Amino acid sequence: MNQEQVLDEFRAAGALLEGHFKLSSGLHSPVYLQCAKVMMDPARAGRLCGTFADQLRATGAQIDLVVSPAMGGVVVGYEVARQLGVPGIFTERVDGEFALRRGFEIPAGARILMMEDIITTGLSSRECIKTINDWGGNVVAAGCLINRSGGRAEVGAPITALATIDAPTYKPEDVPQAMQVLPAIKPGSRDMKA
């Protein structure tokens, strides 16, 4: 599956949106990728995550465990773990910081794939990786279905993405006039600070 075919999967799911969006980072963008709509179709999820698993295997990375940040990475991380034949767990925010709950543990030295749905600034990925490191895990790769930073986001590990796009983001005070006339929609799941 090439990059255009990956984006076609998002389009077919009605998950590649254009307009004026407030992202969970607080930034604004004319492009939004609603990964949850893509992952709600098990066949589509299997195709995308299977392709990702094949690309990751081609890098030679050896993975013992997949760890994802909640909420967006949970389904993607589970399906990639299933495709790789390894366990998958997730971190959750507790008092604003990622932590392991539900009896999850990371064995010291375990080779970890940190798996996200979408990377924009890389903040959630970096926070998840910090939690993994705090547990003594070894993050050997970071992954996402779509890297919307144009490849500029740094997360602290090599990133494998099914597609990389350069979707512009703006601080609220820098939103272009053409976007300002549209209502800002917040389609994500995380509460943002005002």
Image: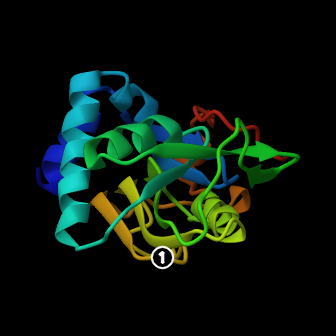
Rendered image quadrant of residue 17: top left
At x 18%, y 49%, the residue is 51
The mark tally for this picture is 1
Q: Residue furthest top?
A: 41
- Dot 1 alpha-carbon crowd within 10 angstroms: few under 14, some 14 to 19, many 20 or more: some
Label 1's element? loop
Is any atom of residue 103 visible in this view?
Answer: yes
Apparent side of residue 82 relative to residue 24 in the rendered image (left or right): left
* Above-or-below relation of 168 to 32: below
- What's the colour scheme? rainbow
Q: Position of residue 132 (x, y in %)?
A: 63, 64
At x 37%, y 64%, the residue is 166
Rendered image quadrant of residue 62: bottom left
Rendered image quadrant of residue 108: bottom right
Is any atom of residue 115 visible in this view?
Answer: no
Q: Position of residue 69 (x, y in %)?
A: 59, 49
Q: Position of residue 161 (x, y in %)?
A: 32, 61
The residue tagged 1 is: 157
Q: Residue furthest right?
A: 95
At x 75%, y 51%, the residue is 99
In depth, the one of 116 and 122 nearer the eye is 116
Q: Position of residue 147 (x, y in %)?
A: 39, 60
Apparent side of residue 39 relative to residue 190 in the rendered image (left or right): left
Residue type at mark 1 is Ala
In depth, the one of 136 and 127 nearer the eye is 136
Apparent side of residue 54 relative to residue 124 in the rendered image (left or right): left
